[in-house]
Image: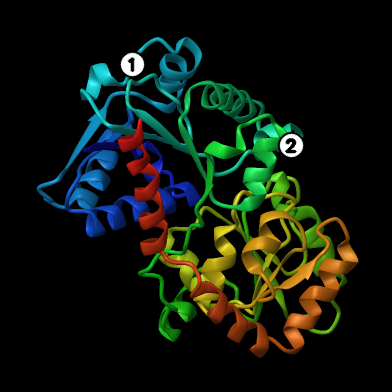
């Protein structure tokens, strides 16, 4: 059979990028029988996308990579808004088409999509209006046309069912951290601390969108009195607060530096209001870093009993959770290592291949 996968999101450095890259790479490693067409759309970043897709395909005889001159905005217009352009006119016939996080094109193939996160639809005030608009439109097309929906958590499945989706076509397939992820060397940790003028012990927070709960993280951190040299390092641009004592805003951080920051942190503070999966939790577990996260939704589902669970709406709960981890983190580090071993890309790919094989029954 011919399986086509839209990998357009792979160049954006998000959790969806990690998912797309590792899913395709693992599928190509375990499945030599079927043919894979890996496609993507970009304009200004076409060379980067082409290079990324070619690196994944890596000369395999049963796989090819193609890039088309479609930006996310153009793809949204043609495939979501107008909805009359069939992707088949560009790529030919497929048995399965696995669409991306952004668009849902028309096709005669068995239609599979991964819905990573529906936060923009459930909590529109926490997202940019444009993102809310695109995701709402895309979900409407998913509900009408898709044959099978993959979600990364039971939480996301339940959320879709509440929105009227058919639970019988929704498959929960957990994701995993990058298999090549490993704890950074001491020299790498010291280098990234020096580069960013961190200097001492620090907590790490990743992401600054409203649903990442950064305001309450900062408020909880300011209440901690035990160690006045402790820093809070925040990855992401945050304009609301220009300067807060012992809080360091780093803006964008490249992949090698972010994992060095993880490796050197006292803990990951991740009390999000909503996540479809919560990949940073597993990344921290994999690197031997304890996690403070929310006692709700997918965060609790993914972390299990291996993290310090707190009420994301209660500053004092977050503060107390952080303080407990700072006093004794050895148990959580051990439990985190055990927990992350339950997630693997080989398992994710095998279960995804099972979804693709449903096309044989159609």
Q: Residue at the spot x=76%, y=69% of the render?
A: 309
Q: In the structure shown, which secondary structural element does the residue marked by tag 1 occupy? A: loop
Q: In the structure shown, which secondary structural element does the residue marked by tag 2 occupy? A: loop
Q: Quadrant of the N terminus?
A: top left
Q: Quadrant of the C terminus?
A: top left
Would residue 244 be found to the left or right of residue 173 on screen? Answer: right
Q: For the residue carrying disc 1, how many other residues have a C-alpha within 10 Å: few (<14), some (14-19), or many (20+)?
A: some
Q: Taking the image as drawn, is residue 193 in sight?
A: no
Q: Could you say where residue 126 lies in the image, as x and y percent from the top left?
A: 73, 38
Kindly check if marks 1 and 2 are in contact, taking CB atoms under 8 A apart as contact: no
Q: CA distance from mark 1 to mark 2?
A: 31 Å
Q: Residue at the spot x=41%, y=40% of the render?
A: 9
Sequence-first disc among 1 and 2: 1
Q: Could you say where residue 96 lies in the image, as x and y percent from the top left?
A: 32, 34
Q: Residue at the spot x=38%, y=26% of the render?
A: 71
Position above or below: 340 against 6: below
Q: Nearer the viewer, residue 152 or 179?
A: 152
Position above or below: 218 against 171: below
Q: Residue at the spot x=33%, y=30% of the render?
A: 42
The mark found on residue 123 in the picture is 2
- Residue that sits furthest to the front in the current view: 361
Residue pointed to by mark 1:
86
Would residue 300 be found to the left or right of residue 56 on screen? Answer: right
Q: Could you say where residue 361 lies in the image, as x and y percent from the top left?
A: 35, 35
């Amino acid at each position: 059979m011919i399986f086509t996968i839209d990998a357009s999101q792979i160049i954006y450095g998000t959790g969806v990028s990690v998912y797309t890259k590792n899913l395709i790479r693992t599928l190509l490693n375990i499945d030599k029988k079927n043919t894979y067409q890996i496609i993507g759309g970009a304009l200004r970043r076409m060379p980067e996308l082409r290079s990324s897709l070619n690196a994944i395909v890596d000369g395999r005889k049963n796989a090819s990579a193609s890039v088309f001159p479609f930006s996310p905005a153009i793809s949204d217009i043609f495939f979501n808004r107008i909805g009359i352009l069939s992707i088949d006119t560009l790529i030919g016939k497929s048995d399965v088409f696995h669409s991306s996080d952004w668009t849902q094109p028309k096709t005669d193939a068995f239609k599979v999509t991964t819905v990573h996160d529906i936060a923009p639809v459930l909590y529109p005030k926490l997202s940019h209006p444009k993102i809310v608009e695109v995701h709402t439109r895309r979900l409407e097309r998913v509900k009408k046309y898709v044959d099978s929906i993959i979600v990364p958590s039971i939480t996301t499945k339940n959320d879709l069912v509440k929105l009227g989706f058919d639970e019988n076509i929704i498959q929960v397939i957990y994701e995993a951290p990058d298999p090549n992820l490993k704890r950074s060397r001491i020299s790498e940790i010291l280098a990234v601390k020096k580069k960013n003028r961190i200097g001492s012990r620090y907590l790490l927070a990743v992401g600054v969108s409203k649903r990442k709960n950064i305001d309450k993280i900062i408020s909880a951190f300011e209440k901690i009195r035990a160690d006045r040299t402790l820093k809070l390092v925040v990855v992401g641009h945050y304009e609301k607060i220009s300067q807060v004592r012992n809080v360091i805003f780093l803006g964008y951080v490249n992949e090698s530096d972010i994992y060095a920051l993880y490796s050197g942190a006292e803990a990951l503070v991740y009390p999000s209001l909503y996540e479809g999966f919560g990949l940073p939790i597993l990344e921290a577990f994999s690197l031997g870093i304890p996690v403070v996260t929310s006692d709700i939704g997918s965060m609790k589902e993914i972390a299990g009993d291996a993290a310090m669970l707190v009420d994301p709406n209660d500053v004092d709960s977050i503060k107390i959770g952080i303080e407990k981890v700072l006093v004794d983190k050895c148990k959580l580090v051990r439990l985190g290592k055990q927990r992350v071993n339950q997630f693997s890309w080989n398992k994710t790919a095998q279960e995804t291949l099972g979804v693709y094989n449903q096309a044989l029954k159609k």
